[in-house]
Structure formats: structure tokens, C-alpha cells
Image (tube, rainbow, N blue to C red):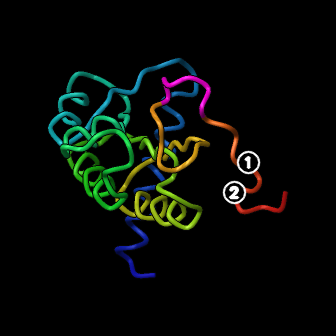
Amino acid sequence: MGITCRIQAAMQMNVSLHFVASFRDRPSFLMEAHDGLSAAIAERAGFLGLWASGLSIASALGYRDADEASWTQVVDVVERIVDATNIPVLVDGDSGFGNFNNTRLVTRKLEQRGASGICLEDKGFPKLNSFIGDRHPLLTSTNSAAGSKP
């Protein structure tokens, strides 16, 4: 691992630790961001962290909130959000972009681009809006999703 990679890894760890520390002692709010400008405005307004909303990112790209934006498009937008700010970014990973392999890959790419975390929903793919009744059965155990034995 080169010196640049080590520095970047240390910086990423500091951002992630800052994310955890920022919310440990008191409740707080994350502001939604869907591009670099909205992220910079939220940071300047005093928010301690950002929520990279799947709905807002899809809408800004001209898509419906139905997994029409690819994971690579979401990662690219998140990179712009991270580059425009110095506060942690939690990413809406929806239902993981299809399967375990895609989820693992998008998580790794988001980490490389500077995201502090990803929030995944235990739903089917393609996603359905969360407000549509009880149409989302539990798909798997937490251990299975983490790659552990059940």
C-alpha cells in the first residue's frame, strides 16, 4: 500500500470516526443532499452530517425512485457530495442494488469515494416505495446478509 493510499485510508477512518462521535452524545439531524451544491449549503448551514438520499439523487438524475439509477451513478454523485464538504455522508443504499455481490461492491466503492456509511433496507429488488403498505417481507437474517453462517 503506497503512502497516498495510507493517508487516504487514515483520512477516511477519521471521517467515519467523526461521524460516530458527532452523534454519540446527543440526537442530531442529517440534512439531505443530492449533489455537491446542496451538500455545501447544508454544511454551511451548520449540519453535522449529510444523508445522500436515494429518492433525491434519482430525481436529480431524472429517474423515479425505483432503482432506475445505477449504483455507479449513485457512487459518482456521492463522490461529488463528499468532495464538496468536510462532514460525514451517510448513503441511502436502498435494497442493495440487486444482490449480495452488488451490495458488497457498491459498499466498497462508496468507502473508496469517501462515504462514511451506507444504510441498507431488507427489501426485494427492485425496490418498492416504503410507504406502500406491508409489501416488504424480511428477506434474510442479519448473519446471512453479513456473510456469516446462519
> Predominant secondary structure in magenta?
loop
Three-letter amino acid code at the position of disc 1: Thr
Q: In which quarter of the image is residue 2?
A: bottom left
Residue at the farthest top position = 27
Residue pictured at 46% horizontal, 81% vertical: 1
Residue at the farthest bottom position = 1
Residue 83 position, x and y percent, is: 23, 51
For the residues bearing labels 2 and 1, Cβ distance under 8 angstroms: yes
Q: Which of 47 and 139 is in front in this view?
A: 139
> Is residue 42 found left or right of 146 in the rendered image?
left
Three-letter amino acid code at the position of disc 2: Ala
Residue pictured at 35% horizontal, 34% vertical: 50
Residue pictured at 14% horizontal, 38% vertical: 37
| Image quarter of the C terminus | bottom right
Q: Where is 34 relative to 109, above or below?
A: above
Q: Give the range drawn in magenta.
A: 130-135
Q: Which mark is residue 112?
A: none
Q: Provide the secondary structure element on which disc 1 rests.
A: helix
Residue 114 position, x and y percent, is: 37, 55
Is residue 99 in the magenta section? no
Q: Provide the secondary structure element on which disc 2 rests.
A: loop
For the residues marked 2 and 1, what is the alpha-carbon distance in whole angstroms? 6 Å
Q: Residues within 10 Å of mark 2 (few under 14, many from 20)?
A: few
**Residue corresponding to mark 1:** 142
Residue pictured at 24% horizontal, 28% vertical: 42
**Residue corresponding to mark 2:** 146
